[in-house]
Image (spheres, coloured by chain):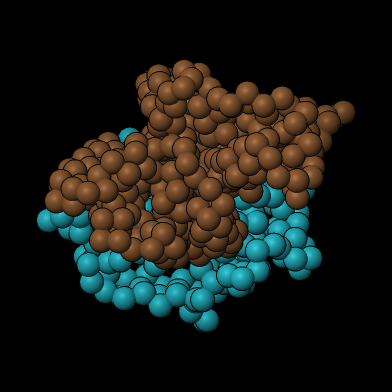
Amino acid sequence: MNVALEAHELRVCYGRRTIFDRVGLRASAASFVALVGPNGAGKSSLLRVLAGVQRPASGEVTRPKRTSLIVSSVSPPADVSPRELASYGPAIARAWWRIFDDENERAVVDAALGRVGLRERADDPARTLSDGEIQRAWLAAALATSPQAVLIDEPTTHLDLRYQIEVMTMLRALARSGVAVVAAIHDLTLAARFADVIALLAGGSLRAGPPDEVLEDNALSAAFGVGISTHRDPLGGHIVCIAR
Amino acid sequence: MAIIDAGRPALGHLIARRRAGWIVGLAAFFLLVACIALLVGTVPVPANAILAALAHPSTPGLSHAIAWDIRLPRVLIGACVGAGLGIAGAMLQALFRNPLVDPYLTGVSAGGALAATIGFAIGVSFAAIPLAAFVGGLACALLVAFLGSGGAATANLRLVLAGVAISALCSAAVTLVLLRKGSDTLTILSWLAGGLSGRGWNDLVWCVLYLTIGVVATLFLVRALNALRLGTTAAAGLGLDVGAARLQVLGAAALLTAACVAVSGVVGFVGLMVPHGVRRLIGGDARWLLPGSAIAGAGLIVGADTLARTLLPPTEIPLSVLLAFVGVPFFVMIARRPVEL
């Protein structure tokens, strides 16, 4: 398998508190990794470190040249339209002396908006968009950078069921197009259904593998501090996690 | 929130039109104010005499001298100072993600004033004063940014406190320099008080030169300013080198401020009020906010300067005094309600 993103022996500390230590993760191109774990385990920190936005206390990360981090829990300014949001990445990547965008750049932005189905609403300000559309706009912002790896923090939080499925479907399609996708997801069942790899970050360490391996009752119960049992969805066959 | 798509007008188009409309409106306001500023003054000259003098630059006379040597350069300098401070304020507010920030509060003005005072005191030529002001302003801005950084939740408060503290330190140092210097104290003091009285073409040339460099630098920073509106993590996540971008924005803002401080002394509150007002009208997108702030700042300074020299004849009220009377209530007002940058 073609490894796109690889991290070794990562340690992140805030002051004297160590959030996690000796964490390693590999994400191959075209795979969808769901990062799960309790609040405060360091999912957001790990994504920032993987993206190179935050420096780890120790350890190293190998990432593709074009890696985008999307913090989708943050709302964009109310007057920003999806087209503007999607244009920021290409604008930053442009040579510094070129003040204006060109035909090519506009086409890339347009294609990204098309892929998330936002072409109709491309020029509407964020305040008029639904939460689902905002998430799709963030996704378009990542797509417009023509990424080799996309890291997304909580793309499904605050979304209702329909939008959750929609966003996860898009992320999986993005992975299938050859991009390494790592997304922090709270909903274990959702993660199990869509992701190729589950990375469970809890208690300062990380365990990654296929959903069947990682999502098992004892490990999950210990990680979240609450009894969790796993079942099989009689229709799809994927894992369903229920807290007791 | 569900939005029904059928028959909806193109919202983006409407917004762009509205923004352009406001820019045109602000430009019209500026032109109106500039015309009034040319036509009124302490020396009563009929409006048509001024217009005639402006139309025929080669005919000498009193109205010619007033129009060409006093009022026109003063209006142009006022426009430059207002535009520069407006842009610098808008950039600093976006950079620090703090609506209470302006060149004055971040210590850029005070640092520039201190460096310029030292320059005047040791007899540096006027051409180099903006450069001295730039170095001083940038040094103070960096110091304030450093002192005010970290600790996300309290960063805004710390930044403003650091700015106030550094500004106070600079003012104290200015006083010390003036005391040691002795001779030219009055000239330097009247310059420091902030205002445009007695400024001429020579000042304008240097101000324009430095402003142009600052504005050109700003053009390259527009995309970084817009990306920074998303927050530093999101901007970095899309590939922005946040550290470098912040330094560049700070540098450009310091240069713009320095160009203004060198000709007009410390004129507070313009960099605060103008971007704020303009943001309320046309939003925080730097592509619109920066030109809007430039035009509105020019209008505000030219208008306030006109009032400053005509309100209490023959006394000229220092520009900064007049602006403080408007600026302080404004500051209190925006400190009370939240605004999006």
Q: Quadrant of the C terminus of chain A?
A: top left
At 43% from the left and 23% from the top, the residue drawn is: B315
Query: Measured from the top left, where is residue B340 in percent x and y?
Result: 49, 33
Query: Measured from the top left, where is residue B339 in percent x and y?
Result: 47, 29
Q: Which chain is depicted cyan?
A: A
User: In this view of the protein, can residue B12 be seen by the observer?
Assistant: no
In the displayed structure, would residue A217 be above or below residue B197?
A: below
Q: Is B225 on the left-hand or right-hand side of A137?
A: left
Q: Is B44 on the left-hand or right-hand side of B90?
A: right
Q: Is B76 on the left-hand or right-hand side of B187?
A: right
Q: Which chain is depicted brown?
A: B
At 51% from the left and 76% from the top, the residue drawn is: A65
Foreground pick, B294 / B179: B179
Residue extending farthest right: B7
Query: Measured from the top left, where is residue B157 in percent x and y?
Result: 27, 36
- The answer to which image quadrant residue B14 occupies is top right
